[in-house]
Image: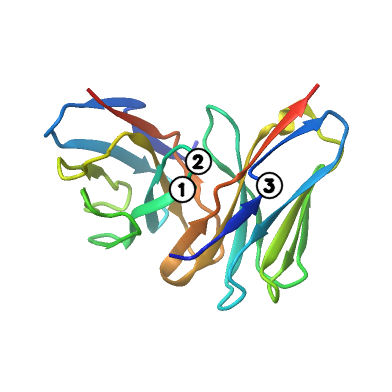
Amino acid sequence: ILNVEQSPQSLHVQEGDSTNFTCSFPSSNFYALHWYRWETAKSPEALFVMTLNGDEKKKGRISATLNTKEGYSYLYIKGSQPEDSATYLCAFLYGNNRLAFGKGNQVVVIP
Amino acid sequence: DGGITQSPKYLFRKEGQNVTLSCEQNLNHDAMYWYRQDPGQGLRLIYYSQIVNDFQKGDIAEGYSVSREKKESFPLTVTSAQKNPTAFYLCASRLGGYQPQHFGDGTRLSIL
């Protein structure tokens, strides 16, 4: 079973503050890394698909970077808003079309 | 609208009973997946299928069975052999390549 680690597991952020969290994954046999946002009472939705070392992706106030050589990805939220409250999942895509998920980063934005 | 439909949303199982969770997709995706989520744990893969009439065990397949007779459908049966079936079950599908997964809304299974 591949090990995908996310930290911190949960965090509370004041509205307007920026925050970031980490996803660590195996640095060998890299294929792709996905980030998903999972809001309460909804299904997880894809945020980013990252494939190349040095990739940077952005969607509104959320952005992500990728370092495949050292096996980590950062997700950043700039100027957090209450609607950013969710669990952010990273998933490592590997052989046979399988994904290994981390436990998630649970973010609560305090108004 | 294309998407994945899971039913039912809530399911109760009696001891010794098999139950089947439904998952249907109209996205024309080849690959489909079943995950289980428990408190404090990440999504764990139960079974997946890359093509009709073929499926592979995931990390926690014991006590579960699946079938893939149609591209659109990938039902999961939780058998009486699964000793701790209480969990939240998510179905997903994927086109392939680098593409992300699309998820259903989940089924919460509880034991009576």
In the displayed structure image, the side of residue B89 where residue A3 appears, left or right = right
| Residue linked to disc 2 | B40
Residue A73, picture quadrant: bottom right
| Residue linked to disc 1 | B43
Identify the element where label 3 is drawn.
loop
Quadrant occupied by the C terminus of chain A: top right
Q: Position of residue A105 (x, y in %)?
A: 64, 44
Instruction: Identify residue type, mark 3.
Output: Pro
- Do marks 3 and 1 share a subunit? no
| Of marks 3 and 1, the one in the foreground | 3
Cα–Cα span, label 1 and label 2: 10 Å
Q: How busy is the neighbourhood of tag 3: few (under 14 within 10 Å), some, or many (20 plus)?
A: some
Letter of the chain that mark 1 sits on in the rendering: B
Letter of the chain that mark 2 sits on in the rendering: B
Q: How busy is the neighbourhood of tag 1: few (under 14 within 10 Å), some, or many (20 plus)?
A: many
Identify the element where label 1 is drawn.
loop
Instruction: Note whether B110 is above or below B93 in the view shown.
Output: above
Instruction: Identify residue type, mark 1.
Output: Leu
Q: Position of residue A17 (x, y in %)?
A: 87, 35
**Residue at horizontal 70%, vertical 55%?**
A22
**Residue at horizontal 61%, vertical 62%?**
A33
| Residue linked to disc 3 | A8
In the displayed structure image, the side of residue B74 where residue B101 appears, left or right = right
- Do marks 2 and 3 share a subunit? no
- Do marks 1 and 2 share a subunit? yes
User: Which colouring convention does the figure follow?
Assistant: rainbow
